[in-house]
Image (cartoon, grey):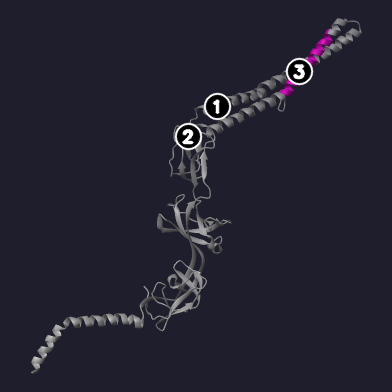
Amino acid sequence: MTPPRIGRLVGVRLWSWRWRIVALLVLLGAGLYLAIPWFLGPMVAAHPVVRGALVQSVVASGRIATPHRVNIGSQITGTVASVPVTEGQAVALGQVLVTLEDSELRASVEQAEAATAQAAARLRQIVEVTLPVAQENLSQAQSTLLNAQQQYARAESLRSGGFETQAQLENARRALNIAQAQVRATQAQVAGNVPGGTEYVAAEATLRQARASLLVALSRLDYTQIRALEAGTLIARNVERGWVVQPNQVLMVLSPIGQIEIVLQIDEKNLGLIVIGQQAVASADAYPDRRFAAELAYINPSVDPDRAAVEVKLRVLAPPDYLRQDMTVSADISVAQRADALVLPVSAVRDAAGAAPWVLRIEDGRARRRPVTIGLRGPQRVEILDGLREGDLVVPSGAPVADGGRVRPVAAR
């Protein structure tokens, strides 16, 4: 048989076996694909142990609060005439928040002013009129007394010489007694009207009482203007025009400006990590990209047994203007930090929260179990104190690799 004919026969046979050949190649490829991982191990994005800065923080959620809220109410019973502010409005110190109807109280003020003016006029009358008249009357009475004394002495002398009758002497004595009585009366009148005298003191007391009544009336009139005792934001308004309000009724709630804190509930297992003065970074859930600084200012001495948590408060050093009362925020409290530490992703450490954490370190193409000692714990990375060296490659916890298994490490992304 000639070579060309032999070639054609071989070609025909190969063409008839083409599917068998393809199937064989597929089987060989599949076998190699399965055999390589079996011999060399799976490809794993290994984590290297590196040096870097690490900050351990306690993360918690809480709400914005003020150290105190001001409940605004009325000190008198009255009818609301106007409410010139709205809920959510920023108000200044002394700004009028509610106005009550004041016509009756204005009339009381006018009445008290009239009584005060009358009392002042009475005291001025004593000083300018009554006392000078009494002093003049005293001077006249003293002159009359001196004349009566002289007349009586003359009558008594003449009666001794027989020139006057007894009736004339008695008349002189009566005139003397009347003059003496007039002097005593005018002396009492003067004494009563000088400063410290009874009339003067009574007039002064009346004036003081009138002035006190005027102050009371003015104070009650001022109560019709309910003002902000502090600058801040109104977070509640429970009053409308025409309402009748009474004392001890909360009309508005004011959140004072510039005094902002964050109230958090920290898991009690982290209680040993936090101390007063630690720095924190917080962000409102409504503005997650806008972070602001805070400082740990208070740790409640008791633990809530129902929630196994302790309440802490962070002082906001420079409150951003978008913060609102009761706004939900998240805070990271920095409790420790290292500038140069051996760090590894949390996902590479097995049983990281347990008493005996360990890792799978890649050694000569195989994964070997190695115990490690953990130091600081960050949200994404942990500090390795013992068990690994810088540059070691570690298998992530989710990789399908067992202790002693082969592994092909690739750079983690």
Secondary structure at numbered mark 2: strand
Is residue 12 shown left or right of residue 336?
left
The residues tagged by marks 3 and 2 sit, at their Cα atoms, a distance apart of 57 Å
Q: Which amino acid type is marked by label 3?
A: Ala
Against 240, residue 369 (above or below) is below
Question: Which stretch is magenta?
Answer: 171-192
Residue that mark 3 sits on: 185
Q: Foreground residue, 312 or 341? A: 312
Nearer the camera: disc 1 or disc 2 = 2
Q: Foreground residue, 103 or 86? A: 86
Label located before the other in sequence (3 or 1): 1
The 10 Å Cα crowd at callout 3, few under 14, some 14 to 19, many 20 or more, is some
Is residue 332 shown left or right of residue 30?
right
The residues tagged by marks 1 and 2 sit, at their Cα atoms, a distance apart of 18 Å
| Coordinates of residue 266 in the picture (x, y in percent) | 51, 59
Residue that mark 2 sits on: 99
